[in-house]
Each structure stands twice: as C-alpha cells, then as structure tokens.
Amino acid sequence: IFVHGAIDSLTMKFVPSLESRFHLPETSPPPFKSIHKKATYQVNGRLIDDVHEWVDALNEYLQIGLDDFERRPNWNNERNSRGGEALLAIQNRPSMWGRSVVSVWYILK
C-alpha cells in the first residue's frame, strides 16, 4: 500500500465518509459502533478489517471524489460545498480528526 502520510492506530483500516466536510470539526469524533462483522461504521467513516478490501475502499473513495469534482468543480452559491470536498477533507488532519493516511505522520506521535 502506498500512502502519502502514514498508517497508524487511527488510520489503519479507516475509510472516511464521502460526506466528510473540509472544515474544522466543532465536536470530538464519535466512537465506533459495530454494525456487522466485516466493517465498523461511524458518522465520519468506517473500519474495514481485510487489507485488500480496505485498499479497494480507499481507491473507491478517491474515484468517487474525483468524479464528484468533475461534476461540480466550483463552490455552491452558499460556498459551503463543492465537488470533491471529501478529497479536500481527507488531506486535512483536523477535518478527519487525525484519521487520514494522506496527512498523518509519525513525528507527531
């Protein structure tokens, strides 16, 4: 697996929600809740135990985000959403509560 940032205890197995927003969260991250045996979900993402499924899900996240950006490249009139916003969020540590294989690094641990 290639990642720009790092894989640590917060990012391993984690796939953010496509509803992730590029902003500073005003709350702490909610706890994970187990829904079924293959994945664990929460408001801002899911955990996937199988490494191949996890990589596939991250690649799908990327592709859906790129497709969304292609459809909606500009901010909406309220300037609170745009296509590909989930991709902006995943590269921003605060937006992901530190759960990003794109922007986390071991030196902060």
Image: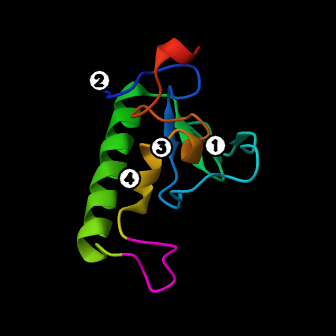
The residue pinned by badge 3 equals 92
The residues bearing labels 2 and 3 have C-alpha atoms spaced at a distance of: 20 Å
Q: Which residue occupies the foreground of this view, 81 or 67?
A: 81
Q: Which mark is residue 1?
A: 2
Instruction: Single out the mark in the foreground, 2 or 4.
Output: 4
- Residue type beneath disc 2: Ile
Q: Secondary structure at mark 2?
A: loop
Distance between the alpha carbons at the discs numbered 1 and 4: 26 Å
Position of residue 73 measured from the top left corner of the image (x, y, whole percent): 28, 72
Task: From the viewer's perspective, tell me whether residue 31 is left or right of residue 99.
Answer: right
Give the residue drawn at x 67%, y 46%: 35
Q: Earlier in the sequence, mark 1 or mark 4?
A: 1
Q: Residue at x 34, y 59 (%)?
A: 65
Closer to viewer: mark 3 or mark 1: 3
Measured along the vertical axis of the image, is residue 104 above or below residue 41? above
Q: Which mark is residue 87?
A: 4
Q: Of 18 and 98, which appears nearest the observer?
A: 98
Q: Quadrant of residue 74?
A: bottom left
